[in-house]
Image (cartoon, rainbow, N blue to C red):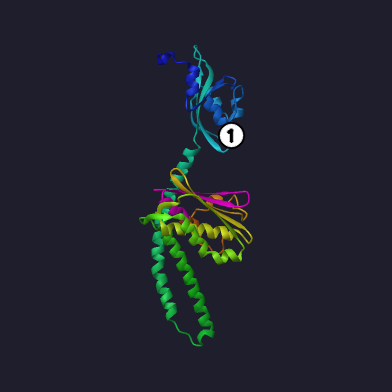
Amino acid sequence: MKIKDFNITRLLESLPTGLILIDKNKTIIEANPEAKKLFGEDIEFKDIEEVFKNAEKSVFDKVFKGEHVERSVVELRRSLIGFSASPVFDVSGSIMGSSIILRDITEIREMEEELRRKDRLAALGEMVAGLAHEIRNPLASIKAGIESLSFKGGKNSNDYRFQAIVLQEIKRLERIVNDMTLYASDKDLMKSKVNLKGLIGEILLMFGQEIAEKNIHVKNNLKGNLTCYVDRDKIITVLNNLFLNAMEAIVENGNIEISIRRGKKNMIMQVKDDGGGIPKDIISKLFIPFFTTKSKGTGLGLSIVNRIIQNHHGTIKVKNEEKGACFTITLPKE
């Protein structure tokens, strides 16, 4: 059989993109299987503007004026559908309808946003590195100067108490500068073959006393061979931050679940808690440097975590579960 003799219906059914045909009344007269799959229902004989509720208003009026519509987007449930529309002419040259080509562009948009975010964070990282360098040297001089002062009246004097307060605040600034340096650090990773199960054991030992004091129940779900090539110290920093956040989310008598499993290409780690979850208005800001809701926080903890995972060519995502929050990390196995 020659390609020109190929049945047009079979061609429409085999297309990997969605195709819709509408008549001049804007009624869908045909939709191929891919289009129906995108909308999750049989949309034939429905009004196109009813199906495309969130599309630009009067977008199809343009088509019936002879214009081509390109790169428009309609939001459908949790997906973004990109579409283009063109007029269909009869033998006399009059517009008799329109053809609409559709494609799910949700992942593409997410990838574009991720790339833009990485560019912004890279630029911010360079700025933070410069700030940390400029702050560290005068801070060391101030600390040395304060420590060298001696006051009459000894430890009971007001001057001595003021000195102690200043030194305490200097130490707090040093912690902030150290966090800034750690965030800005983009050095080569010191990768080695690491058993992630062993790291979890270290974390639980480190936080053992606080776990007992808050009566937190920790459940481990560690399946199979859990070795992969990572920077051991950096991944400990990641797990420390996530576990500490989970404990802080729980007042007492709560649960934390740590799970690691081996996927086809990635190691998948999850840290869940039942501490009430994260407010919807801040969940998208969690990985932004210096954003914090804690009175004593620097807002760099999760930013550092995110940067470490990015440097490992992995991903980190967060979502609210029924009773709390869940952080999911993927790391390449090799």
Residue 330 screen position, x and y as percent: 47, 48
Amino acid identity at mark 1? Asn
Q: Is residue 329 at least partly visible in the picture?
A: no
Residue 82 screen position, x and y as percent: 50, 32
Image mark count: 1
Quarter of the figure with residue 296: bottom right
Quadrant in which the N terminus is drawn: top left
Near mark 1 (Cα within 10 A), the count class, few <14, some 14-19 or many ≥20, is: few
| Residue drawn at the location 41% of the way across and 76% of the way down | 144
**Farthest front residue in view:** 224
**Farthest top residue in view:** 92
| Residue drawn at the location 51% of the way across and 14% of the way down | 90
Residue 16 screen position, x and y as percent: 47, 27
| Residue drawn at the location 43% of the way across and 58% of the way down | 234
Q: Nearer the viewer, residue 264 or 53?
A: 264
Q: Is residue 176 at least partly visible in the picture?
A: yes
Q: Nearer the viewer, residue 308 or 192?
A: 192
Is residue 127 positioned above or below 33 on the image? below
Task: Please check the rendered image and state whether residue 330 is part of the magenta-colored stretch, yes or no.
Answer: yes
Relative to residue 236, is residue 279 drawn left or right? Answer: right
Task: Please check the rendered image and state whether residue 317 is part of the magenta-colored stretch, yes or no.
Answer: yes
Residue for badge 1: 54
| Residue drawn at the location 44% of the way across and 46% of the way down | 266
Q: Range of the magenta residues?
A: 305-334
Residue 56 screen position, x and y as percent: 56, 32
Q: For numbered disc 1, what is the local secondary structure? A: loop
